[in-house]
């Protein structure tokens, strides 16, 4: 398609153990659930059935995204493509909320504060202490980062700032080589990328939620602009239902 020379596939990891428990996760490196592994396999099957065969994959350095990419690529018979990993695709760091129950947080702090921390563009949760149980300080995969770069909390604006250099330096060159690129990442790092791609306002991004395990396909024009705003989910009905469930997560008992 000359008017859409570039194909980008976004895939949020399958359900994680802390998604199932309704806990704020952020940079805590939890595993997929059995359901999440099934979602990843289905995502790969949808890619294969649609002929959307990745030539390269980019993931975060968190196992839920890495394992999702391995399962999906294997199911699409593309397990052999090159993979690059970066902390810049990590989930948003949830600060002192990491490990806390979403429903309890909502009950304790109220709807307004909960939504500010969870979905505002520029209000981060309180920072996580370096000696806290769910801190990433000292984690081997981040030892090359200057201490001041390692986040202790992030708002979505912070994620945009640390994700975009990777988008421009690693993902865009692969797209411009004509490769079909799979980005296997997280709800908020993908919200940050979608915000950039679709030019979504700082206010409107609060209403956008990304479901687990369902490929979101962007066909981009020569200027890397989406030819279909918002992209196209390979299972639109399931995606709409699952995105609504993500939005309501704070209320899950
Ligand atoms: O990090 C987490 O808790 C989830 O993966 C994303 O959570 P959210 O949808 O509440 O931002």
Image (spheres, rainbow, N blue to C red):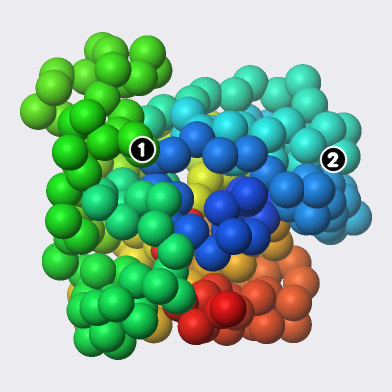
Closest to the camera, between mark 1 and mark 2, is 1
Percent of width and height locating residue 57:
60, 33
Left or right: 51 in relation to 67: right
Looking at the image, which residue is at 25% across and 49% down?
Answer: 95
Mark 2 residue's CB less than 8 Å from ligand 1? no
Percent of width and height locating residue 2:
60, 57
For residue 134, the mark is 1
Disc 1 or 2, which lies upstream in sequence?
Answer: 2
Q: Is residue 239 above or below residue 19?
A: below
Q: Quadrant of residue 108?
A: bottom left
Q: Residues within 10 Å of mark 1 (few under 14, many from 20)?
A: some
Considering every residue shown, the one lying at the far bottom of the view is: 111
Looking at the image, which residue is at 66% across and 55% down?
Answer: 15
Q: CA distance from mark 1 to mark 2?
A: 34 Å
Q: Nearer the viewer, residue 226 or 21?
A: 21
- Classify the position of ligand 1 by quadrant: top left, top right, bottom left or bottom right: bottom left
Left or right: 109 in relation to 208: left
Q: Residues within 10 Å of mark 2 (few under 14, many from 20)?
A: many
Q: Is residue 113 above or below residue 72?
A: below
Q: Quadrant of residue 228?
A: bottom right
The answer to whether residue 5 shows anywhere in this view is no
Percent of width and height locating residue 187:
48, 58
Label 1 secondary element: loop
Label 2 secondary element: loop
Looking at the image, which residue is at 56% across and 39% down?
Answer: 30
Left or right: 150 in relation to 67: left
Q: Quadrant of residue 19?
A: bottom right
If the image is split into quadrants, where does the N terminus sit?
A: bottom right
Looking at the image, which residue is at 36% across and 38% down?
Answer: 134
Percent of width and height locating residue 37:
78, 46
Which residue is labeled 2 in the image?
Answer: 76
């Amino acid at each position: 398609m000359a008017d859409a020379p570039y194909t980008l596939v976004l895939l949020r990891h399958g359900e994680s153990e802390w998604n199932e428990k309704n806990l704020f996760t952020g940079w805590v490196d939890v595993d997929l659930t059995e359901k999440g592994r099934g979602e990843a396999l289905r995502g790969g099957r949808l890619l294969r059935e649609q002929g959307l065969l990745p030539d390269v994959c980019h993931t975060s350095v968190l196992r839920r995204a890495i394992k999702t990419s391995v399962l999906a690529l294997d199911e699409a018979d593309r397990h052999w493509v090159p993979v690059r990993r970066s902390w810049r695709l990590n989930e948003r760091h949830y600060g002192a909320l990491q490990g806390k129950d979403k429903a309890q947080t909502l009950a304790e702090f109220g709807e307004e504060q909960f939504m500010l921390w969870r979905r505002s563009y520029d209000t981060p949760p309180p920072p996580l202490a370096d000696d806290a149980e769910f801190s990433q300080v000292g984690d081997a995969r981040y030892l090359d980062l200057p201490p001041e770069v390692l986040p202790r909390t992030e708002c979505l604006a912070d994620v945009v700032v640390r994700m975009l250099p990777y988008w421009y330096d690693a993902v865009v060159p692969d797209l411009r080589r004509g490769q079909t690129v799979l980005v296997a990442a997280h709800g908020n790092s993908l919200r940050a990328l979608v915000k950039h791609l679709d030019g979504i306002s700082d206010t409107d991004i609060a209403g956008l939620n990304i479901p687990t395990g369902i490929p979101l396909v962007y066909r981009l024009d020569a200027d890397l602009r989406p030819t279909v705003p918002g992209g196209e989910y390979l299972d639109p009905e399931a995606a709409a239902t699952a995105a609504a469930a993500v939005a309501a997560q704070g209320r899950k008992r």
